[in-house]
């Protein structure tokens, strides 16, 4: 629930949101909205998302309360929906972009380039040139080759040296195997930047997406302090930026992670006046704000087993099952076969399999899932579908993930 009416006013005037239809959601009002959308689209029955901007505002308030000294740079790759990005910008978020297209998307919303960190340690030369042209002047690096490219194409850009976190925190998607300087590489990289007359403004790390062990932040912040000290020893200008990356989730683990971050900052950086601490949260803001509704397009009964086909799958929004190691959950919405009780309360359930629409057997969304008896043209609703879902979907077999529409809503004020 949104606790601050002002946040809602800000969102409604946000670029990407302003002028679009928004539906107020009373408590437990999502069912009515989904029914309304379905009834107005009876002919095609395409899948659709509901974005609850009230959830976004609540999460921003939670971040500000829990980590008041850490400036969020939302990771655009997680979900680049324009209305979502506009709301995040209006609520004060800055942005972590990894490509020219992501930078363009953010700047098109009126976001100033000083609210963007180009947080990709390995960038195409043409993308570096673009960043220079539009004034995005902060980026990450973890190799001498990257220093050479930046020196050649964006010599005024400030740098953050990306270091490998000592511990991935049990992350769902570890990033250490691909990015981050090793301890023995730090000094040569700082010297390379110094020789190229590039300013290294600070340190960046990322313990991995969807971390579960908050102690990993402490270890990484300690490692970052070592790099600050190394830069001082080498005679580099004083570092003043610490990017603690992402890995945050909006569930109960967040409180532990926030406590670990604050404690580590106090322990290792209490004598660093003027320090700016930033972060790159993605799923923390995006995951729970989006709900996906899918239509049942096929059914097969084999004894007690029920098998259903829906019109989105692992080549679309549910690619998160493969690439983000996600577990999805489906709830029934039997508005065709059981209009009076669409959520099927009290009904017998069956062991069920849910397939996506493509002709690949890999396109299996759920197995062993308990569902009531449903029929073709009923629906399955998937909550918490905002993180690494539509953003990584494909056009395989002609099922175009990019064509899935998003309906805007906002939770009622408490």
Image (cartoon, rainbow, N blue to C red):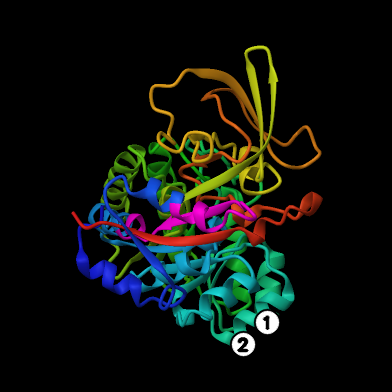
Give how far across and how far down residue 81 sits, in percent: 53, 64
Q: In the drawing, what numbered circle is on residue 129?
A: 1
Residue 191 in view here: yes
Name the mark on residue 365.
none
- Against 343, residue 195 (above or below) is below
Horizontal relation, residue 198 to residue 407: left or right: right
Q: Are marks 2 and 1 in contact (CB under 8 Å)?
A: yes
Is 48 covered by the magenta stretch? yes
Question: Between 143 and 83, which is closer to the camera in this rendering?
Answer: 83
288 lies left or right of 355: left
Q: Is residue 244 visible?
A: no
Q: Is 52 drawn above or below residue 359 in the view shown? A: below
Q: Which residues are magenta?
A: 36-57
Q: Which residue corresponds to the image point at 73% horizontal and 52% vertical from the top-left? A: 399
Residue 282 covered by magenta stretch: no
Front residue of 271 and 34: 34
Please state, as top left, top right, bottom left or bottom right, where the C terminus lies in the image.
Answer: bottom left
**Label 2: element kind:** helix
At a point 41% along the width and 33% down the height, the residue shown is 341
Residue placed at 62% from the left, 48% from the top?
A: 317
Q: CA distance from mark 2 to mark 1?
A: 6 Å
Residue 378 x/y as whole percent? 56, 39
In the picture of the structure, the residue carrying the numbered disc 2 is 133
Image x and y of residue 203, in percent = 47, 61
Q: Position of residue 282 (x, y in %)?
A: 47, 55
């Amino acid at each position: 629930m949104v606790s601050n009416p002002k946040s809602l006013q800000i969102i409604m005037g946000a670029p990407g949101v302003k002028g679009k239809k928004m539906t107020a959601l009373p408590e437990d009002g999502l069912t009515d909205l989904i029914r309304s959308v379905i009834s107005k689209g009876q002919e095609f029955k395409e899948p659709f998302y509901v974005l609850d901007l009230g959830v976004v505002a609540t999460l921003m308030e939670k971040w500000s309360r829990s980590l008041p000294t850490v400036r969020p740079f939302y990771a655009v790759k997680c979900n680049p929906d324009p209305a979502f990005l506009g709301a995040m910008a209006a609520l004060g978020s800055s942005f972590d972009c990894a490509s020219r297209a992501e930078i363009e998307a953010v700047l098109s919303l009126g976001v100033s380039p000083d609210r963007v960190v180009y947080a990709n340690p390995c960038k195409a030369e043409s993308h570096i040139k673009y960043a220079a042209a539009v004034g995005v002047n902060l980026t990450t690096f973890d190799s001498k080759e990257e220093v050479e490219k930046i020196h050649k194409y964006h010599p005024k850009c400030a740098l953050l040296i990306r270091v490998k976190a000592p511990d991935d925190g049990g992350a769902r998607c570890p990033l250490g195997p691909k990015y981050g300087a090793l301890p023995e590489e730090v000094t040569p990289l700082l010297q390379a930047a110094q020789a190229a007359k590039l300013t290294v403004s600070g340190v960046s790390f990322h313990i991995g997406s969807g971390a579960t062990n908050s102690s990993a932040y402490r270890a990484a912040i300690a490692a970052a302090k070592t790099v600050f000290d190394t830069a001082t020893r080498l005679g580099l200008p004083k570092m003043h930026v610490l990017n603690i990356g992402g890995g945050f989730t909006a569930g109960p683990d967040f409180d532990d992670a926030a406590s670990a971050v604050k404690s580590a900052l106090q322990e290792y950086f209490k004598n660093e006046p003027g320090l700016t601490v930033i972060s790159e949260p993605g799923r923390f803001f995006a995951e729970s704000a989006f709900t996906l509704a899918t239509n049942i397009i096929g059914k097969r009964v084999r004894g007690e087993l029920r098998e259903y086909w829906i019109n989105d799958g692992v080549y679309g929004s549910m690619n998160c099952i493969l690439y983000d190691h996600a577990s999805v959950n489906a709830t029934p919405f039997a508005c065709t076969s059981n209009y009076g009780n669409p959520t099927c309360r009290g009904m017998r359930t069956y062991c069920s399999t849910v397939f996506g629409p493509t002709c690949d057997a890999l396109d299996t969304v759920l197995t062993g899932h308990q569902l009531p008896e449903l029929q073709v043209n009923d629906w399955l609703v998937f909550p918490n579908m905002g993180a690494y879902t539509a953003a990584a979907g494909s056009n395989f077999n002609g099922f175009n993930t990019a064509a899935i529409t998003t309906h805007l809503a906002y939770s009622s004020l408490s």
